[in-house]
Each structure stands twice: as structure tokens, then as C-alpha cells.
Amino acid sequence: MGDPVKDEDLEVAVPGVWRPTLAAIVDSLARRVPVVGAGIPSVDPVPPETSQTCFQAVDDYGDVTLISLPDESWETSVARWYGDRWRCLVDLWTKEEGRSDLVLDVDVFEHDAGYRFHVHLVYVP
């Protein structure tokens, strides 16, 4: 769970310091707020069209309901350093099936004394 690792050759568990923010982003997806991550201070503004694409990916996946991330999500969600940022793939969970094939794709950047989160997409890898 430790500190973020800067090694392009390693895929590691999502660092604990990022988990609350990533969980809050997932909660915003599950609640289907109009803009994913809205109101979360360290999350870059997500364009409305990106939010809609994320919601559409969930809808296209099937008749499922996203839920808040259980602790088990962190056993399989991963992060990797890409020279200037980390790419995180967070496994999403549904009420109907538990762990789904869907992932939330987020970049994490070092910023001042903390981190910034940039939401890309929800998809099935």
C-alpha cells in the first residue's frame, strides 16, 4: 500500500494515499452525478462529454448498478509510472456481479504537496 513507485517496469498496487480520492470518483460514477468527480478538490475538471462517455460505457456493459469500491478492489487495481504520471486502472464493482470487467482509467500527477487526478474513461480492457 506504501508510497507511489516510479518504475516504468513495474505494475503495482494503487498506493493507499490515492485510494480515498479514487473511491470518491467511483462514488460519483455510481451516483451518476452530471460530471464525474465534480466537487472533489484534487480532481481535474472532467468535460461533460467524457462523463457521458463513462456513463455510456457502464450502460453498454449491461443492466448493472455500480457500487462503492469494496476493500477487495485494491487487491486487483493497479498503477504504473509513465515518466511524468501514473496511470491507474481501478476495478469497478456492481451490485449484480461483484467485481466487473469494467475499469476506471485515471492519470495521477504530482502537484505541489499532493496529487492531481485526471479521469480518462471507463471501459473493458
Image (cartoon, rainbow, N blue to C red):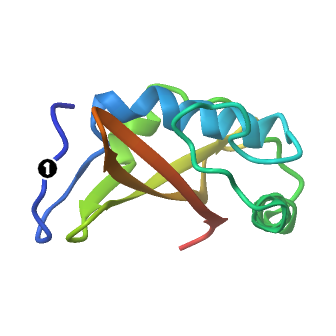
Front one among 61 and 52: 52
| In this view, 85 is above or below 12 | below
Q: Can you identify the residue that label 1 sits on?
A: 5
Q: State which quadrant residue 116 falls in.
A: top left
Q: Report if residue 125 is visible in the image.
A: yes
Q: Is residue 96 visible?
A: no
**Residue 4 screen position, x and y as percent:** 19, 43
Residue 78 horizontal/vertical position (percent): 33, 53
Occupied quadrant, residue 26: top right
Residue at horizontal 50 percent and vertical 32 percent from the top: 21
Q: Position of residue 49 (x, y in %)?
A: 83, 68
Q: Would you say 101 lies left or right of 71 here?
A: right
Residue drawn at 78 percent across, 58 percent down: 51
Label 1 sits on what residue type? Val
Query: Is 65 displayed left or right of 41 in the figure?
Result: right
The structure residue drawn at horizontal position 75% and vertical position 66%, both measured from the top left corner, is 50
Q: Residue furthest front?
A: 112
Which one is in front, 86 or 47?
47
Say which of 98 and 45 sits in front: 45
Residue 119 coordinates in the image, percent (x, y):
58, 57
Say which quadrant the N terminus sits in.
top left
110 up-or-down from 101: above or below: above
